[in-house]
Image: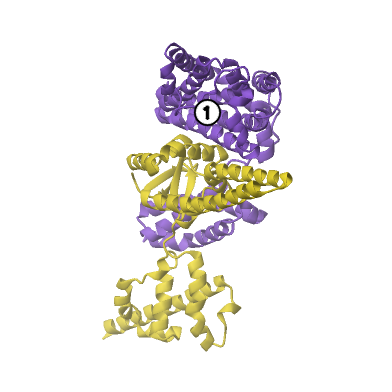
Amino acid sequence: MKAARFLETRGAAWDRLEALVSKAARKGLAALNEDELHELTRLYPAVAVDVARARMYGMDPQTQQRINRIAILAHGLLYRRPRARPVPAVWRFLSWGYPRLFRRLWPYFVLAVVLSFVAGMGAYVCARIRPATAYVFVPGPIEMPHKGPGVTPEDISERFRQIPRPPMAAGVMANNIKVAFQAFAFGITAGVGTCYVLVFNSMMLGGFAAHFANHGLSYEFWSFVLPHGVLEILAILIAAAAGLRLGASLALPGKLTRLSSLRAGAREAVFLVLGTMPMFAVAGMIEGFVTPSDWAAGLKIGVGLLAAGTVAAYLLLVGHGAARTERAV
Amino acid sequence: MQDFDFIETPENVALERPLAGIGSRFSAGVLDNLLIAGLVAVAALLFFAFASASMAGEFSGFSRAGWWGAAVVIFALFALYWGYFVFFEMVTNGQSPGKKALRVRVVREAGGPITFTDIAIRNLLRAVDGFAFYGVGGICMFFTKKAQRLGDLAAGTVVVSEQVRDYTARTDKRTARTWEQEIGAEALRASGLNPQEFHVLYNYWKRHNELTLDARRKILPQLLHPILQRAGQQPDDRSFEALEAFVEALLSKAVEAEEEASRRARDSGAAT
């Protein structure tokens, strides 16, 4: 008879808590007034205990489900982190957290640089020694402008000059961010996928560079690539470092279980890759507007170096002090 | 894969959450992707409109505006592809439109609503999970206890089902068979109800703890309407709580009368 008595005495509490949680279902706790909030905090623990008692008494499944559902909803309302306001959070991240995160994860960045350099140089040397191998690294046959007295970097970018600039800047930006996201996500294959993305892209660049060098167009090639390329390559390397961080957390969990190591790694790595988005935005602008412009090659490269240098200084110098204390919520 | 996930609360009670199955998650994914495809189609039409307007445009000013429009569209496509799930899961606390339609929600494994970090991780990893039409994610869900794809594993999230079964639609056949034996003539007389009315109210009262409050609020005034009307009242005149108290009082009076009658019958039987 315990069960029936239990139903009788506790029914009112369930009804009341159900009324409260359904009132807060849409707008959250803001929908409740002060008295109702107190009531919610008072009722929830008792109803949570009722869930356990109902299970113990072997109450009918429908009643069990009902109390459980009410308790889950109340639990979701009560146990949550204070919601951070987005604008201050983003500002704090960019002005403090991100450079620190980069400096904390520098070994992964160095690893990405080394991998990329080895792959790129390997492809470059191969294609320099045996020019035919350039087509292994470079997608499709490319038309080479013949080296002559009149060839300028603008001839190389001729194909790009025909594409209107605003859509091209947007397209380049989107594509690069996509590659960065992939470099991060593929890290979940214990880093193998990230290495693949990184090595593939580095070899392509090395192959291109060798191909142009074989035709004696090195200067023209680099003066086309460098203005936007320096910042782009820097950002891709950071994204790859994020992927390697994710991969390492899975491959080398240390004292943690593999799953909790993966979670901790993902939490660090995801912010490392998200922080590259503004860099790609700037690089896309340069590629869309500066690279195809009529400026002198030296000036264009200067713009690229300036942008990359600014980012490098930001990553190395910003955020060394203590964090400003967050305002209590 | 199991059907339920448990969260330990600070009260040391394990609350259970029904997990969303592969089927409902796949359906939700199909719906979301159809919606994305629709939006992409609109964006593509806009892109071609801008592009052709720019090509045909004689005036350079108009042409430039057209190309800027095209740039915005390209960027919107990108943002749509990567941002659709992030945006909706952020705004609706874990429910993209497809998930909403299938009544499933993303929650933290540890309990409570998801954060931006969780959402960013689980949706960036779609790049891997989505491989071969979510083949990678599907296989992963099949082999994990809580039906998690790689993104869920890395972010520490689970997708739970929020379908609430509507018990109001079912009748209890067992009670329907025996109600005539349960209601005595004395109880009927004391309550002033006819057998059907008594049966309905009696069953309502027996099961009222299993019904959701909303369902009860909906049903009870309907059940009481003819009875109160006979007494010259409207159910709307009284609060729901008063109506329930009225039913309880009516039924307990009837049951007491019935018990009294049977006791008297027993006593008189013993006397003879």
Viewed as shown, does residue A13 lie left or right of B62?
A: left
Residue B258 location (% of width, % of height) = 38, 80
Depth check: give the residue in front, B32 or A317.
B32
Judged from the image, the secondary structure of the residue bearing numbered disc 1 is helix
Which colour represents chain B?
A: yellow
Image quadrant where residue A129 sits:
top left
The vertical placement of A326 against B199, above or below, is above
Task: Check disc 1 and give the amino acid type.
Answer: Ala
Which colour represents chain A?
A: purple
Viewed as shown, does residue A100 lie left or right of A208?
A: right
- The residue lying at 40 percent from left, 50 percent from top is B26
Image quadrant where residue B134 sits:
top left
Image quadrant where residue B150 sits:
top left
Q: Residue furthest left?
A: B272
Residue B210 location (% of width, % of height) = 42, 64
Residue B179 location (% of width, % of height) = 33, 78
